[in-house]
Image: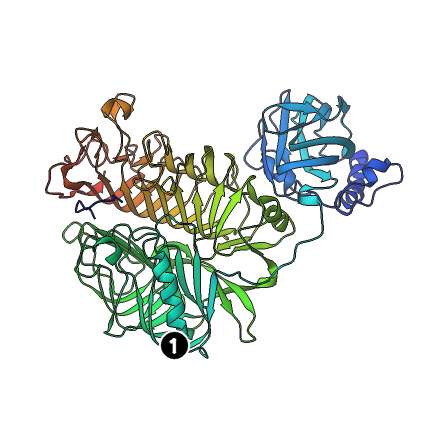
Amino acid sequence: MPPSSPPHPAHGRPRRRRGRSGLVAAGLVALATFAAVTGVVPATYTAAAAACGTTNVAQGKTASASSTENAGTPASAAFDGDAGTRWSSAFSDPQWIQVDLGSSQQICRVVLNWETARAQTFKIQVSADGSTWSDATATVNGVAGTQSLDVSATGRYVRMYGLTRATAYGYSLWEFAVNTTGGGDDGGPGLPGGGDLGPNVKIFDPSMSSASIQNTLDTIFNQQESNQFGSERYALLFKPGTYSGLNAQIGFYTSISGLGQSPDDVTINGDITVDAGWFNGNATQNFWRSAENLAVVPVNGTDRWAVAQAAPFRRIHVRGGLNLAPNGYGWASGGYIADSKIDGTVGPYSQQQWFTRDSTIGGWTNAVWNMVFSGVVGAPAQSFPNPPYTTLATSPVTREKPYLYVDSGGAYRVFVPSPRTNSSGVTWANGPTPGSSIPLTQFYVAKPSDSAATLNQALSQGLNLLFTPGVYHLNQTLNVTRANTVVLGLGYATLIPDNGVVAMNVADVDGVKIAGLLFDAGTVNSPVLLRIGPDGASGSHAANPISVQDVFFRIGGAGPGSATTSLVVNSDNTIIDHIWAWRADHGAGVGWNTNPADTGVIVNGDNVIAYGLFVEHYKKYEVIWNGEGGRTIFFQNELPYDPPNQASWMNGSTRGYAAYKVADNVNTHEAWGMGSYCNFSTDPSIVADRGFEVPDKTGVKFHDLLTVSLGGVGTIAHVINNTGGAAQGTATVPVNVVSYP
């Protein structure tokens, strides 16, 4: 948002039967797999091989290949630990399959479990960067069944480079295992789970005096009220019980949460307040703060939560009303509510846009430009554009965010809510939220001093990650490879890639949950900050989706930063539930060539759904959607403020880039409640030809769209494709399109 005050608010062919030799080879699989996993090897192995580590460090890691036979035989199947799935290539030479171990490792053994369709000749090669390769073996003859090769090489990437095939089919591997000796994922003692939550998690108990709690709250707020780009981070956690006489004012990088299993387990008789006194009554920069999993009984009957982007209000029971505007009803531009119950009325007042999902409200007073409700009991009826309410009775597929709580014995655990389909209202209306509970002992409790290698070791051990508040510098990619892994941040834990690496990769596996993190671009350009699934991911996760929740991205603002794309989603069925991807328009290190970033979000997976998609100021398309069956419910965007002139912001012969691009080859896509705004403050004569760019196909449907020129600073010529009038002029009036086509 602007720094000043314009009023903007199995296979493709049948599996072949093995002959007797194939059965003998299959009988060797168990022995070889046992050797690869346990390190217990036949006496004929060399002394060097006997020193190999005990872990298959390639299992679950990001994989790719020169080709695949079909969608049922992806590269990832050779690294999934399942001897019943396989990779197979096209029927030609040469071919290769490779794996990214996540860090440079000392490689001492490779074990290949070939199908009958194997290599006649091949090499094992290693690389530091996935581009320049060195031979780790001479040319090797392929052996049917399991083939174990002792090697001595160092590299992050390992590949089988197939030179010639033994059959008329392609190359086919059931499994590809890599063992290492010393260092990396395979070295050192195991890391412990559980532990303390660090100095920046403040834990309150009902036995504490209200005065002492208030003193801590005030001290943190006084530090964080205007600390927009500082490095301090805090989580304020309240154990179950009742607290009275408190006013918890919430500043930057501060989260307030209850530690009950349900919101009503923690009651604050008092207020949880966000206002905008620090910015002269302008709430458009009240970013990066949150409230979660408690009940509040406001002193005067109405709580105030005057926020902008990246400020979620989750699992809150307001026993009264909720005011979303600052004192004096100054400018406001938010926001997000989910799984919450507000007994009274919600008053957005000056809020330009807002998204509410799967909640219950007592009423809603007004709308400015774009108010969207999905699965909200008590929501106003559909009426866009007058008033601009977009209302969906249910949300198609959801899973609520994981959260920390204490059980009846006082032990910390993380609760993981179950997925829901066609949902409405709160998950806790009829008792505790359905789901599963994970003890903290199954999490590595990370501190900012932890290295990326340590965090990867924890993940490779099968631990989940809980990031305590602080700033984490990463010199290697964090690799989340195990299905159902939870990666949860407290207090806006912030991840910075220092040397241009991808900050985090998630494998194409079921049920990974990434939540509560801020990805901050480093000074060396990263191609991607968060990647969900490797390129070409094709597994279905419909029964157990991957989720990305309250995950935020920043390019610049705290200092120069650069990342080509913030979020890439390759995995099918992913749920994106509230993100803000922001190329900074103010703060330090801000400028057209100082904090470059092309695109906020690229979706390549099929059947991906996004709720609460906030993406702003990127230099090219803000969102590119390449997958089939995509859905977005609520989108808020501002185009970049700072193109120097029209010539510097052209997409071929098209003036500028649309905010939201659905690829021309996509046949099915649907979106509701979509807004894009412009404020070309560097050169107000700049024109964007359209806010939304989509293929004209019957399966591509858009509902309730708007464009706005903020104070007349620049023009968006059309809303969607060539439909809708120009957003221009100083009146700051939206141009609306109710449906397209």
Q: Amino acid at mark 1?
A: Ser
Q: Is residue 13 above or below residue 198?
A: above
- What colouring style does the render use? rainbow
Helix or strand or loop: what does disc 1 sit on?
Answer: helix
Image position, residue 317 (x, y; %): 34, 69
- Report the residue at 22% width, 29% height from top: 689
Taking depth in this image into account, of 87 and 341 the one nearest to the observer is: 341
Image position, residue 424 (x, y; %): 34, 62
| Residue 706 occupies quadrant | top left
- In-image side of 567 versus 311 (left or right): right
Residue 166 appears in view: no
Q: Is residue 211 above or below residue 483?
A: below
Image position, residue 664 (x, y; %): 34, 30
Give the residue at mark 1: 210
Q: Is residue 168 above or below residue 690?
A: above
Image position, residue 669 (x, y; %): 34, 40
- Report the residue at 30% width, 39% height from top: 585
* Quadrant containing the C terminus in the rendered view: top left
- In-image side of 511 versus 720 (left or right): right
* Quadrant containing the N terminus in the rendered view: top left
Tally of numbered tags: 1
- In-image side of 235 versus 248 (left or right): right
Extreme-right residue of the structure = 43
Taking depth in this image into account, of 351 and 233 the one nearest to the observer is: 233
Residue 664 appears in view: yes
Residue neighbourhood size for the residue with mark 1, other residues' Cα within 10 Å, grouped as few (<14), some (14–19), many (≥20): some
